[in-house]
Image (tube, grey):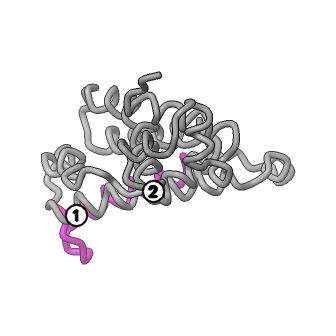
Amino acid sequence: MVVRREGYIRAALELLDEVGLNGLTLRRLGDRLGVQGPALYAHFRSKQDLLDQMAEAMLDDELARLDEAEYDEWSAWLSERARVIRRALLSYRDGARLHAGSRPTDGSAMLPLIKPLVAAGFSEQDAVQAVLSVSRYTLGCAIDEQQRPPEETTEHGEDPEASFEFGLRALIGGLRRAAEDPTDGTHGP
């Protein structure tokens, strides 16, 4: 059976949903696909390389649609990006943990992300910090949500989505104020 790299990644994501991050191994993936280790290592240098590729694949389709959409304001784009990432991470078992342990495979990936912010007047440095801040907030919320048993959330009356939205509004509001008042110690526009 000939399986392309994308097929390995999709199969690994399906396996992740079944066995979780702790149960995901190259051997288990090879068994599922009917291939031996060397076939996997021809596509991935290590398990970490596979995990990095899986993390990117989780987000690629959703973010591609987002990046094609038109937004009137940087804050709407950045907020929707956070929502899309959160939904994608929560759509896979241990998706947030997988993403937290991964590293981008393309070192130039940040450049397209900051374009809307730079166009709005942020310095490149502040644009990078803004994207990273919102991304880390989103990831932290998704990790917390996936690790907390559902009964614990309902027991305390917490609505994870409402909590996420509240924090996101606060973060975006702070970025907006920093952009409007560069004398507050930031390097914003």
Q: Residue under label 2, please give it.
A: 48
Q: Residues within 10 Å of mark 2 (few under 14, many from 20)?
A: few
Q: Which structural element holds mark 2?
A: helix
Q: Nearer the viewer, residue 33 or 143?
A: 33
- Name which residue lies at 43% across and 26% down: 3
Nearest to viewer (mark 1 / mark 2): 2
Q: Is residue 138 something one can see in this rendering?
A: no
Q: Nearer the viewer, residue 93 or 50?
A: 50
Where residue 6 appears, as percent x and y from the top left, is 39, 30
Q: Which residues are magenta?
A: 165-189
Task: Say what secondary structure mark 1 lies in.
Answer: helix
Residue sitting at 28 percent across and 26 percent down?
69
| Identity of the residue drawn at 38% across and 57% down | 103
Identify residue type, mark 1.
Asp
Return the x and y of residue 61 as percentages of the image width and height: 38, 29
30 relative to 111 in the view: left or right = right
> Considering depth in this image, is 10 or 83 the residue closer to the camera?
10
Q: Are marks 1 and 2 in contact (CB under 8 Å)?
A: no
Q: Earlier in the sequence, mark 1 or mark 2?
A: 2
**Residue kind at label 2, given as amino acid type:** Gln
Task: Tell me the quarter of the image containing the C terminus.
Answer: bottom left
Q: Residue at x 19, y 52 (%)?
A: 108
Residue 5 showing in the rendered view: yes
Which residue is label 1 attached to? Answer: 126
State the predominant SS element of the stretch in magenta: helix
Taking 130 as reference, is 134 left or right?
A: right
State left or right for residue 158 relative to residue 35: right
